Image (cartoon, grey):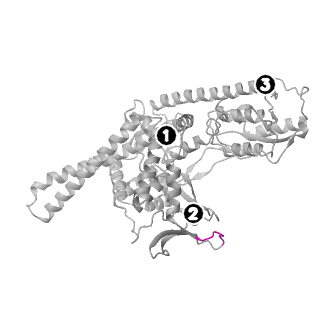
């Protein structure tokens, strides 16, 4: 559509524009103009029309496909509502939104008169009924294009996997040329030795030191700098967390888990995949890690204090948690209390009794409401992460199967050895006790694997139903009210990330997932965006 502005009733030069540019590495639209190109064309349009652009351009690198994930966009909307900006300047409508919720929000701001204009080098918007209808259609087309492209890309990825071709970050010790097939690189043997070191009982710290001594690193792809000039690569060196994650990946013996599929690379015709390790070593490493998590125990305090290191002061907002302990009341009884030790805090008094915190939580949990509409928003949002969760579950199943294989073999060997030992001997008694322990562990592992496999077969089990969520909150309220100090502590840590208490002794909190997503869905005002 041609850019004609003669019919404008508003003086564009008196509006305060914000320039918003977005190009996401998460999107499939790789050919989209770079951020510097978008800014350049928008600036040229601003100069041509005499638009007044406030501050620097806002540069977003997150996808617009799903709402609520772009902090810069969200802040821009808040600033528009607060009157900091009157209008938006952007390269194209699909830079602003690829989902109906945020697209609807922008149209609502136009309806309310808070957003007086939108300018694009590629499209002419008019602030009237036809203009808003057309803009809404463009947002819908953007969403359809994004959804359709995602499906096509997904089908392509699954098709490639059947041929052993992969996507995403390459595996350590391998390169993935343009054909998508993994081949060993110059660090193959170093990573292989890291697996052997781990299999012999080496710690993650020892493995990291070894890889550092081998100058192990991976180079990123050649990418332009922030100004779009030149190309450079970065060296990525393994951290302890990435090393620990690697040791749970069955790829290294030939089983690739991706896009809800598991492919045995060793059996693909025409693909001479070179496994780094044997499956037996993988199972041994899984068993070692499993045993460490079971055997790890922390020193227990002589007295248990609920919510230790969990309660913070909302008056001074200090990063230090409030001190918990017993204080003697006027009646001579000892009561549990929390105290802010920040010397600059003006809380009066400095401490308060723990029962105030829990009373506040009981009431909020039992009276929490969740509408059908809010739960539907949560379901749509959480559904997009289900595939990633399924992949993680499959990887966990593979790891636990490795542990189960290792434990079952040890159980069989020990059981067969018992008849050859003298009755009543220390060796036989010790072996019998170990067989009993292993039998319990094998049974526990088998139950875990069956539960996880059930979730993969029925992905709906991964997310909580509305009734389960509300029943859990009511149950938590009742259990916390009637339970011991330990039960109060456990339920709080399951539901929340932390608690903050103000001068009125009322607790506010940050929810854990999946509760955070459910609660966030209730905070979207009815009639905003969803109706568009």
**Residues marked 1 and 3 touching at CB (< 8 Å):** no
Q: Secondary structure at mark 3?
A: helix
**Residues marked 2 and 3 touching at CB (< 8 Å):** no
**276 is higher (above) or lower (below) than 149:** below
Q: Position of residue 86 (x, y in %)?
A: 82, 40
Q: Residues within 10 Å of mark 1 (few under 14, many from 20)?
A: few
In the image, taking residue 450 as reference, residue 344 lies left or right, namely right
* Main secondary structure type of the part rendered in magenta: loop
Which residue matches tag 2? Answer: 312
Of callouts 2 and 3, the N-terminal one: 3
Give the alpha-carbon distance from disc 2 to disc 3, as whole Å.
Answer: 50 Å
Q: Position of residue 416 (x, y in %)?
A: 14, 51
For the residue pair 194 and 380, the one nearer the viewer reads as 380
Which residue matches tag 3? Answer: 129
For the residue pair 27 and 237, the one nearer the viewer reads as 27
Q: Residues within 10 Å of mark 3 (few under 14, many from 20)?
A: few
For this orientation, the residue located farthest to the front is 331
Q: Is residue 319 magenta?
A: no
Q: Quadrant of the C terminus?
A: top right
Q: Quadrant of the N terminus?
A: top right
Circle number at residue 91? none
Circle number at residue 388? 1
Q: Residue at x 43, y 35 (%)?
A: 459
For the residue pair 160 and 322, the one nearer the viewer reads as 322
Of callouts 1 and 3, the N-terminal one: 3
Q: Residues within 10 Å of mark 2 (few under 14, many from 20)?
A: many
Give the alpha-carbon distance from disc 1 to disc 3, as whole Å.
Answer: 41 Å
Q: Residue at x 70, y 32 (%)?
A: 94
Magenta-colored span:
344-350
């Amino acid at each position: 559509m041609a850019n004609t502005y003669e019919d404008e009733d508003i003086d564009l030069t008196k509006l305060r524009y914000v320039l918003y540019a977005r190009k996401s590495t998460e999107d499939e639209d790789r050919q989209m103009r770079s951020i510097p190109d978008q800014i350049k064309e928008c600036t040229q349009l601003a100069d041509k029309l005499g638009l007044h652009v406030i501050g620097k351009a806002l540069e977003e690198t997150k996808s617009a496909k799903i709402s609520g994930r772009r902090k810069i966009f969200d802040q821009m909307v808040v600033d528009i509502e607060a009157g900091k900006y009157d209008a938006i300047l952007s390269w194209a409508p699909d830079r602003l939104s690829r989902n109906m919720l945020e697209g609807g929000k922008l149209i609502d701001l136009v309806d309310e008169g808070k957003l007086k204009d939108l300018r694009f080098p590629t499209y002419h918007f008019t602030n009237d009924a036809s203009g808003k209808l057309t803009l809404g259609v463009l947002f819908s087309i953007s969403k359809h294009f994004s959804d359709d492209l995602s499906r096509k890309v997904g089908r392509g990825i699954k098709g490639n996997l059947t041929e052993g071709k992969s996507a995403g970050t390459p595996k350590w010790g391998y390169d993935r040329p343009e054909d998508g097939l993994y081949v060993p690189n110059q660090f193959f043997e170093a990573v292989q030795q890291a697996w052997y070191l781990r299999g012999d009982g080496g710690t993650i710290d020892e493995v990291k030191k070894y890889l550092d001594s081998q100058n192990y690193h991976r180079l990123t792809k050649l990418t332009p700098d922030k100004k779009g000039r030149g190309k450079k690569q970065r060296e990525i060196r393994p951290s302890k967390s990435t090393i620990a994650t690697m040791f749970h990946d069955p790829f290294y013996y030939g089983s690739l888990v991706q896009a809800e599929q598991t492919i045995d690379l060793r059996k693909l015709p025409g693909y001479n995949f070179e496994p780094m390790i044997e499956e037996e070593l993988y199972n041994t490493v899984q068993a070692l890690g499993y045993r460490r998590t079971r055997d790890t125990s922390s020193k227990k305090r002589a007295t248990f204090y609920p919510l230790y290191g969990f309660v913070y002061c909302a008056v001074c907002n200090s990063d230090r948690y409030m001190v918990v302990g017993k204080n003697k009341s006027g009646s001579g009884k000892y009561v549990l209390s929390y105290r802010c030790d920040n010397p600059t805090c003006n809380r009066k008094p400095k401490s308060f009794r723990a029962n105030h915190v829990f009373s506040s939580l009981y009431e909020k949990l039992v009276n929490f409401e969740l509408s059908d509409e809010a739960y539907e928003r949560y379901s749509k949002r959480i559904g997009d992460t289900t595939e990633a969760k399924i992949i993680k579950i499959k990887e966990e199943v593979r790891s636990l199967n490795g542990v189960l294989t290792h434990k079952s073999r040890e159980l069989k060997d020990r059981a067969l050895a018992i008849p050859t030992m003298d009755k009543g001997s220390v060796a036989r008694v010790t072996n019998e006790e170990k067989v009993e322990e292993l039998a319990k562990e094998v049974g526990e592992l088998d139950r875990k694997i069956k539960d996880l496999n059930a979730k993969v077969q029925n992905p709906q089990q991964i997310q909580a139903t509305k009734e389960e969520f509300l029943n859990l909150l009511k149950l938590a309220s009742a259990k916390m009210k009637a339970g011991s100090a330990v039960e109060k502590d456990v339920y709080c840590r399951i539901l929340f990330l932390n608690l903050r208490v103000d001068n009125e002794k009322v607790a506010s909190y940050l929810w854990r997932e999946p509760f955070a997503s459910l609660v966030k869905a209730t905070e979207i005002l009815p009639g905003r965006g969803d109706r568009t």
